Image: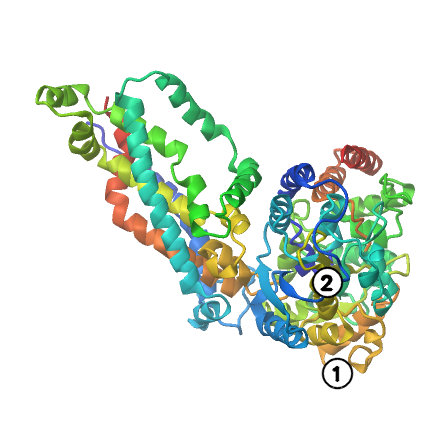
Amino acid sequence: MHPSRGVVRRTVRPAVPLLALALALSACGSDGGGGGGSSADGRIEGRITFQTWNLRAGYKDYFESLVKEFEEKYPDVTVKWQDQPAEHYADKLGADAAAGTLPDVVNVSPDLSYPLAKAGVLLNLDKEPVAAKFKGEYTAEAWRGNTLPGLDGAYAFPWYLTTGPLFYNKALFRDAGLDPEKPPRTYDELFGAAAELSRRSGGRTATLAGTPAIEDFGRYGVRLMDEDATRFTYNEPRGVELLTRYKRLHDEGGLDPQALTSTPEQAGRKFLEQKVAMNPGGANDLANFRKNAPSLYRNLGITDAPNNTGKPNMYVMGLAVNRNGKHKAAAIAFAHFVTDRKNQEAFAHRVAVFPSTKGSLDDPYWTKHDGTDEGRVRVASAKSLKGAVNYTPVVMSDEMKTILRNEVAKALQGKKSPKEALDDAVAQSDRLLRRK
Amino acid sequence: MTRTSWAEKAFRYVLLLAVLALTVGPFLWQLSTSFKSTTEDVYTSPPRFLPEHPTAHNYAEVADIVPVWDYALNSLTVAVASVLTNLIGASTAGYALARLRFRGRGAAGLAFVAALLVPAESLVIAQFTMMRDLHLNNTLTAVVLPGAVGALNVLLMRNAFANVPREIEEAAVVDGANTWQRFTRIALPSVRGTLAVVAIFAFMGAWDDFLWPLIVLSDSERYTLTVGLNFLHGTFQQNPRLVAAGTVIAVAPLVVLFACLQRYFFRGAGEGAVKG
């Protein structure tokens, strides 16, 4: 249930204790208050490092030409681009933050920037006039997406956004006697179609391969946290209602048998194997389907993921600036350069992601479809991005996501009632939240 | 004399085959995936083992995306260095623990056992800050150092030396051999099997390590193969064929090494246990 699992998947599981430890260490080591490093409004010069997260395979040329262009514009600056592999990214960031070797410009998502910002190693862009003056160039949603609760500001320039539709398998719909051209549009229709699918296939075809995650609660209209992000509230009646519906789905055989333990990636694989009828995904998944499951691709149906709030989910990526960097002026200039309208649009033309700069999505590339499947998904997703929110609370660590997943599993297995399970998950998560 | 019945024999073979399928199956699956072409489904149910249109194209593409040979060379450097340091360090330390008499010998032995209990992950940050203070971060030396002398290897060597009959060494003492001569001429040749085990363990440990090299290295040119191959798992492109091809490339040297040393390996695995 994660659109664009390509991006989300990499929030690394065992990283949390390590990252916390690293940041505790770094807190001891820092000089205490006052931004270290150079001044942000100085001359744009020096040697800076720029770190992306797993974008080297496929987009090496793009980043190399980006760096070259910037260096031509500012001959006094040398940019060193490095890319980190998908796994253990949070560990790597934590270790670098602790040792004071964090790159000048770092690719982060809000949940990754939160612990770093809290430890005081990232620049608060709202408080730094040189950076804050660019705020108007980005969409309000994207800037808000990078604003961290309780830390009074945005800590990363908005970069690419990802969102995605719900994919379904027309062949499985047809086999179950459902109209393949009429996919479910609301939660009622979704759960209705699921019941039908498992009944007609004699329990052989499941509808979904994953249990509900925090984004699903958000889309269902559950209030996830209180105003100042100090307490979780997803155990409210609406949340219990969603979990109860999933429980019924599970009992009817509408959830894949391995759903309780599946990661989003494994859930995606079930869809590729054509064992489950529906799976949420990102616009970039189309290429994956075509390449790895050509026969699924021929039967692929695409529809909007249902939501009760009128606001679809999106994931936000950003570029943060190291607060203790030696050449902050150059780092800010470069982070802005990579995320400016021209370069974001160029990147989004290469990858199926969406730019976060104001006005970009009004471009015909994102408003008129060219008849291809990619075009259709692109236009539909771009349209849905207006008013989209990043439902995942940034303070929700991987540990807390795991707690939710485990409690949801207990409820689905019938070991606890949905209400008990969510109450317990909230209680445990709140305890972790207070400990920080 | 007992004779195994026909049924029992069959049962044993079925069991062996089942275990074989369980252990080798996943690897064969990767091998077959790595040869599948882009026009066929990777995920089919039931899975298809033989590629319909076998192609070596995936291997070429892996080399295209990541500088495999550079990474392999880095890995090899690290692994060979680690084998050497472990062989030297573990055998000298093991010999000292097994044969030499000195104050605190028991405590030293205990320290090695205790070191086994500490999970490596909990030390990563401290090690990293230490490497930075030594100005060694981002070097291959830093990758080798923490694993240069493995506690487990020291204990393996200690047990192997302890199991060499003391009388042989006493005879050497009578002949006038000093400690160093006893170590190199008598003790070492009698534990060749365990040395092979230590070599394989050290090689595998260095070759397969992921977290530590990832954290201590920042330049992607210096990455080892396991870290570098992770780039194949791109954010916006999932191609299991490439990942499979990368896995095969990463595992191949281990298979070769094991094939070369397996004669000693099995002798070594039994060495500490049976004699004594």
Please report the residue visible at 28 percent of the width from the left and 40 percent of the height from the top: B196
x and y percent of residue A432 in the render?
Answer: 76, 35
x and y percent of residue A46 in the render?
Answer: 64, 64
x and y percent of residue A79 in the render?
Answer: 61, 66
Please report the residue visible at 40 percent of the width from the left and 18 percent of the height from the top: B107
Please report the residue visible at 63 percent of the width from the left and 43 percent of the height from the top: A98
Q: Residue furthest front?
A: A43
| Camera-side residue of A263 and B258 | B258
- Chain assignment, label 1: A
Q: Is residue B149 left or right of residue B220?
A: left
Amino acid type of the residue tagged 1 in the rendering: Gly
| Camera-side residue of A327 and B163 | A327
Could you give the CA–CA distance between mark 1 and mark 2, rounded to whole angstroms?
44 Å
Q: Is residue A291 left or right of residue A433?
A: left
Q: Secondary structure at mark 1?
A: loop
Please state the total of marks drawn on the protein image.
2
- Chain assignment, label 2: A
Identify the residue under disc 1. Answer: A371
Badge 1: how crowded within 10 Å, few (<14), some, or many (20+)? few
Please indicate, yes or no, whether residue A312 appears anywhere in the rendered image.
Answer: no
Q: Is residue A15 left or right of residue A225?
A: left
Q: Quadrant of the N terminus of chain B?
A: top left
Identify the residue under disc 2. Answer: A329
| Camera-side residue of A19 and B127 | B127
User: Which of marks 2 and 1 precedes in the sequence?
Assistant: 2
Task: Look at the numbered discs 1 and 2 and tell me whether their residues touch, using CB distance below 8 Å.
Answer: no
Tag nearer the camera, 1 or 2:
2
Amino acid type of the residue tagged 2 in the rendering: Ala
